[in-house]
Image (spheres, rainbow, N blue to C red):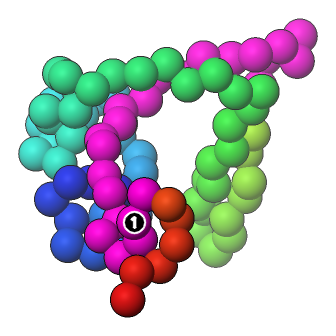
Amino acid sequence: MLLWAKSKPVGGRAIRARSKTVLDKPSFRSLAVERRVLVSAESCGEWLVGDNEKLPTYLQPQDRGIAAFAGLYECWSDLEFPESGEKSD
């Protein structure tokens, strides 16, 4: 979740940063400069939206090995739950 977001629903929606616009968007600009990471994965899925349908699309290496994707990260703590993972009263 993005640090500036006041709630999970707001911060959780900002999950796709596009390389063409990442430096133009205030929500991703500082992350693109300071908090880059490589994410290893066997595949990655994304929905392609057409006129009247959504089609799932998966990207994976031809040899079925591990791929590396560029990522951005932010450190965030859920104030509703302490470090132990239990809900506080």
User: Which residue in the protein does label 1 denote?
Assistant: 82
The residue depicted at 15 percent of the width and 43 percent of the height is 25
Q: Is residue 20 left or right of residue 81?
A: left
Magenta segment: does it hold 82? Answer: yes
- Place residue 37 in its image quadrant: top left
Q: Is residue 13 left or right of residue 86?
A: left
Residue 57 rendering spot, x and y as whole percentages: 73, 45
User: Does 45 sit above or below residue 65?
Assistant: below
Callout 1: SS: loop
User: Does 77 sit above or below residue 23?
Assistant: below
- The N terminus lies in which quarter of the figure? bottom left
The residue depicted at 15 percent of the width and 34 percent of the height is 29
Residue 30 rendering spot, x and y as whole percentages: 13, 33
The residue depicted at 41 percent of the width and 46 percent of the height is 16
Q: Relative to the observer, which residue lies in front, 14 or 88?
A: 88
Magenta segment: does it hold 44? Answer: no
Q: Relative to the observer, which residue lies in front, 56 or 1?
A: 1
Residue 10 visible in the displayed image = no
Extreme-right residue of the structure: 63
Q: Is residue 16 left or right of residue 32?
A: right
- The C terminus lies in which quarter of the figure? bottom left
Residue 15 visible in the displayed image = yes
Q: Which stretch did the figure color magenta?
A: 60-83
